Image (spheres, helix red, strand yellow):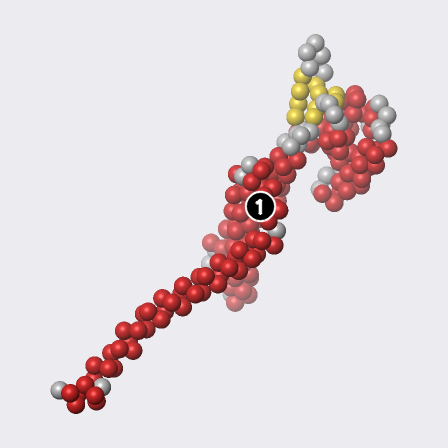
């Protein structure tokens, strides 16, 4: 199974980038091959295309399965296992985000929660705990936002991503409206206080 030049370039790049994404070169190349393949591939085909040993292919596929990034398939009258990457890139994005959250963010969030429940005994601990709370609040806010994004269908998610700077303008408009409303309410609350001194004004006393 010979790879076309464009496919080979894509596969090699994923292998080089793998270490930066937390996976090894073998896993990166296997996933890249499955992603661009027009059909599901078995382990022998993957090994032949990438010049990997059967054991390396097997370990790489297990790693990708643990990340839920490949689907296992069986073909009629064929006892071999076939593997394919999801076709929907947004489904891949959701899976990656969810798996990274479970592996990287959740343990940190759990540690921060435990640390914030402890009673600080020194001024250094008080300062450190305050900094930890800032990090905890940010991480919790981001995970909450990510959970909301995960619930969106692909069409809605695409619309959200395309909004870009429009979201910032909408937030700025919301802040302006909120400030105007607060100013109006403050003015109404102050009005009765301004009227109170008039009750004892000299003009009213002269009339009486």
Residue 11 in the image, given as x and y percentages of width and height:
80, 35
Residue 67 visible in the displayed image = no
Q: Is residue 176 left or right of residue 159?
A: left
Residue 122 in the image, given as x and y percentages of width and height:
51, 65
Secondary structure of the residue carrying numbered label 1:
helix
Q: Is residue 171 left or right of residue 184?
A: right
Residue 7 in the image, given as x and y percentages of width and height:
81, 32
Seen from this angle, which residue lies furthest front? 207
Residue 76 visible in the displayed image = yes
Residue 166 to residue 3: above or below: below
Q: Determine which quarter of the picture holds residue 45.
A: top right
Towards the viewer: 39 or 133: 39
Towards the viewer: 96 or 171: 171
Please name the residue shown 58% across and 53% down the image.
Answer: 166
**How many marks overall?**
1
Give the quarter of the figure containing the C terminus: bottom left
Towards the viewer: 59 or 65: 65
Q: Residues within 10 Å of mark 1 (few under 14, many from 20)?
A: some
Seen from this angle, which residue lies furthest top? 77
Give the quarter of the figure containing the N terminus: top right
Please name the residue shown 75% across and 36% down the image.
Answer: 28
Residue 199 to residue 17: above or below: below
Residue 66 in the image, given as x and y percentages of width and height:
64, 31
Q: Which residue is mark 1?
A: 160
Towards the viewer: 173 or 80: 173
Please name the residue shown 69% across and 32% down the image.
Answer: 63
Please name the residue shown 51% across and 64% down the image.
Answer: 126
């Amino acid at each position: 199974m010979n790879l076309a030049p464009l496919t080979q370039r894509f596969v090699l790049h994923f292998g080089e980038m793998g270490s930066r994404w937390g996976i090894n070169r073998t896993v990166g190349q296997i996933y890249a091959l499955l992603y661009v393949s027009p059909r599901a591939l078995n382990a022998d085909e993957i090994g032949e295309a990438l010049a990997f040993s059967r054991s390396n292919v097997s370990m790489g596929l297990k790693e990708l399965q643990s990340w839920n990034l490949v689907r296992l398939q069986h073909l009629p009258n064929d006892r071999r296992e076939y593997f394919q990457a999801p076709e929907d890139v947004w489904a891949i994005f959701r899976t990656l985000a969810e798996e990274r959250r479970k592996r990287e963010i959740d343990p940190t969030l759990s540690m921060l929660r435990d640390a914030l429940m402890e009673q600080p005994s020194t001024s250094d601990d008080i300062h450190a705990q305050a900094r930890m709370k800032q990090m905890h609040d940010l991480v919790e806010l981001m995970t909450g936002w990510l959970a909301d994004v995960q619930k969106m269908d692909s069409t809605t998610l695409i619309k959200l991503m395309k909004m870009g700077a429009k979201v910032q303008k909408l937030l700025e408009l919301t802040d302006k409206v909120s400030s105007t409303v607060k100013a109006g309410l403050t003015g109404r609350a102050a009005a009765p206080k301004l009227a109170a001194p008039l009750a004892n004004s000299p003009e009213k006393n002269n009339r009486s």
